[in-house]
């Protein structure tokens, strides 16, 4: 799946925990330097944010009208 | 991957667990009180026994789970970390449990000393909780409707407890206060300003996450906490100004806001992507339908006040909102949270060897317990019409459901400990 914000997308909106976390980590492993990934979720994943910060990643979340948080992640 | 998963420091298990295991015992106690006291308790909403049972449910059960869950969930849903969560949990748990018992005993035996002591203990414990959580949340920007809802709900809790203290002291000291207006206002703060906003803030996260529904649309989610708190503040002003028409209007609008939230949640549940109806889903359905029915009665009473004059009206609304509504939402969430936390800790402690969540708390056990709870709701409602026949059986069903809930949760903790002992020898 692609999205205007990134071609690397994990749509975790209908996944049960901890799958969104695991899938995001797997996607991050495949990113090349300079690439960004997009995580789609119906909540803000604060525990994931913490892990991202601890591993030197930056993220930016936007809540869109249907209740999806679009979370852009890059290093 | 596993290293990263455990790198994410798991939320505490011991801190919320003590609340989750104590709460069912208060539901059991409320049922036992109905069983012992019998039909006299249902003579009006003001009988000492019913006031005691109501607060065993609202403070002993509901508040117990809500505050315990918040200690665990604030870092997860808001990224807000409490300082010394285990110490806070220990004191709060003692204060809430002792305070709920003192309050119930104060109502039941008409003892002013016990009521004043309950006001002091509950007031101090909850004030401590509010200070600690406010400190943790104040530095967190409201980037989601959940975080805004949590902040507003804490304000609602302060209002509910403040009014509760005034009412308890007025009863203990024999102050002349407008009982009906203040008690309704206390309930509005407690169920609308606190529990209602908290429920919505949590539902935004847990309904899509656990029931695989679409998300709550952003705009109404941002507005709901604001509208609800605004209405309750308006209601307070109307009571202070002794303006009965405005009180009626605000009561109607508060009920309407609750109905809108419940209707939206029912619609989302209708679009869920999981075919299986598990205990949590069924508990939420029961809670939503029961709450809509109770709120609809309140709404109708604002248009047609004669309805509220009918004997048993307040009892029916109270049963629908508290036992049918909030207790159902709470048990439904406990059935996801407790096995999930047990699983998460086992996963972290045993390096991915945790058993399936359904083995930690079997679905059949939850479904059977839920039938006892649903029977308690139905019996309590019919007992309003035939109290001499049904108050005791309703009490027995409520006690059974409470005891069974304890048994189910305790069983999960037992399986968690046994598994841990196998993998991590002491």
Image (cartoon, rainbow, N blue to C red):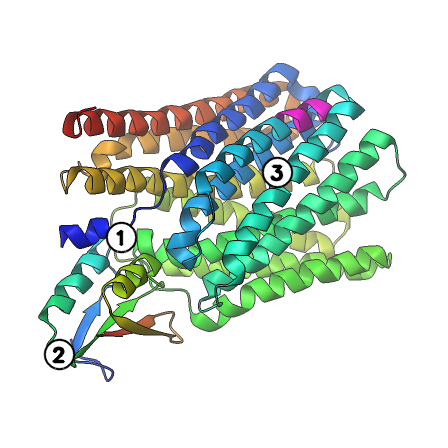
Please tell me which of labels 3 and 1 falls first in the chain: 1
Q: Which residue is mark 2?
A: A33
Closer to the camera in the image, B139 or B274: B139
**In the displayed image of the protein, which residue is found farthest to the top?**
B36
- Tell me if mark 1 has few (under 14), some (14-19) or many (20+) residues whose alpha carbon lies within 10 angstroms of its own: some
Dot 2: chain letter: A
Above or below: residue B126 compared with residue B296: above
Image-based side of B383 in relation to B27, left or right: right
The image shows residue B286 at horizontal and vertical percentages of 45, 43
Closer to the camera in the image, B92 or B165: B92
Image-based side of A44 in relation to B23, left or right: left
Task: Report the residue at 74% width, 40% height from top.
Answer: B165
Dot 1: chain letter: B
Q: Are marks 2 and 1 in contact (CB under 8 Å)?
A: no
Q: Are marks 3 and 1 in contact (CB under 8 Å)?
A: no
| Circle on res. B8 | 1
The image shows residue A1 at horizontal and vertical percentages of 15, 75
Closer to the camera in the image, B50 or A30: A30
Dot 3: chain letter: B
Image-based side of B202 in relation to B274, left or right: right
The answer to whether residue B12 is magenta is no
Disc 2 element: loop
- Tell me if mark 2 has few (under 14), some (14-19) or many (20+) residues whose alpha carbon lies within 10 angstroms of its own: few
């Amino acid at each position: 799946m692609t999205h205007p914000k990134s071609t690397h997308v994990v749509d975790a909106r209908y996944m049960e925990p901890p799958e969104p976390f695991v899938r995001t980590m797997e996607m991050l492993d495949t990113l090349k330097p300079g690439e960004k990934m997009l995580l789609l979720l119906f909540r803000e994943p604060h525990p994931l944010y913490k892990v991202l910060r601890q591993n030197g990643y930056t993220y930016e979340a936007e809540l869109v009208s249907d209740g999806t948080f679009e979370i852009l992640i890059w290093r | 991957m596993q290293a990263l998963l455990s790198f994410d420091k798991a939320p505490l298990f011991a801190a919320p667990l003590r609340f989750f295991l104590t709460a069912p015992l208060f539901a059991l106690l409320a049922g036992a009180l109905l069983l012992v006291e019998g039909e006299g308790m249902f003579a009006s909403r003001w009988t000492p026994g019913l006031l005691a049972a109501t607060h065993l449910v609202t403070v002993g059960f509901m508040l117990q789970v809500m505050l315990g869950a918040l200690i665990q969930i604030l870092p997860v849903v808001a990224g807000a970390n409490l300082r010394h969560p285990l110490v806070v949990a220990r004191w709060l748990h003692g204060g809430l449990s002792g305070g709920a018992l003192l309050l119930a005993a104060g109502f039941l035996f008409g003892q002013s000393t016990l009521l004043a002591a309950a006001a002091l203990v509950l007031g101090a414990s909850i004030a401590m909780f509010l200070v600690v959580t406010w400190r943790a949340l104040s530095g967190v920007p409201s980037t989601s409707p959940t975080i805004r809802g949590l902040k507003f709900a804490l304000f609602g809790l302060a209002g509910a407890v403040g009014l509760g203290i005034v009412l308890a002291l007025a009863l203990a000291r024999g102050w002349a206060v407008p009982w009906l207006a203040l008690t309704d206002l206390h309930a509005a703060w407690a169920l609308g300003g606190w529990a209602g906003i908290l429920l919505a803030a949590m539902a935004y996260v847990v309904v899509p996450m656990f029931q695989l529904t679409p998300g709550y649309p952003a705009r109404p989610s941002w507005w709901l906490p604001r509208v609800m708190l605004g209405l309750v503040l308006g209601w307070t002003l109307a009571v202070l100004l002794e303006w009965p028409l405005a009180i009626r209007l605000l009561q109607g609008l508060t009920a309407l806001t609750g109905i809108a939230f419940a209707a939206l949640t029912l619609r989302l549940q209708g679009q869920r992507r999981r075919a299986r109806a598990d205990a949590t889903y069924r508990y939420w359905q029961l809670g939503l339908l029961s709450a809509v029915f109770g709120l609809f009665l309140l709404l109708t009473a604002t248009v047609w006040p004669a309805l509220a004059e009918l004997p048993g009206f307040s009892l029916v609304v109270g049963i629908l909102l508290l036992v049918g509504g909030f207790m159902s939402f709470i048990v439904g969430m406990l059935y996801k949270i407790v096995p999930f936390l047990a699983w998460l800790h086992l996963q972290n402690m045993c390096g991915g060897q945790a058993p399936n969540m359904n083995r930690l708390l079997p679905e059949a056990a939850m479904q059977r317990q839920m039938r006892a709870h649903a029977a308690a709701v139905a019996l309590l409602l019919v007992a309003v019409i035939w109290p001499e026949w049904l108050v005791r059986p309703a009490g027995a069903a409520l006690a059974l459901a409470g005891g069974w809930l304890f048994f189910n949760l305790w069983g999960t903790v037992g399986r968690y400990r046994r598994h841990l002992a196998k993998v991590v020898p002491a």
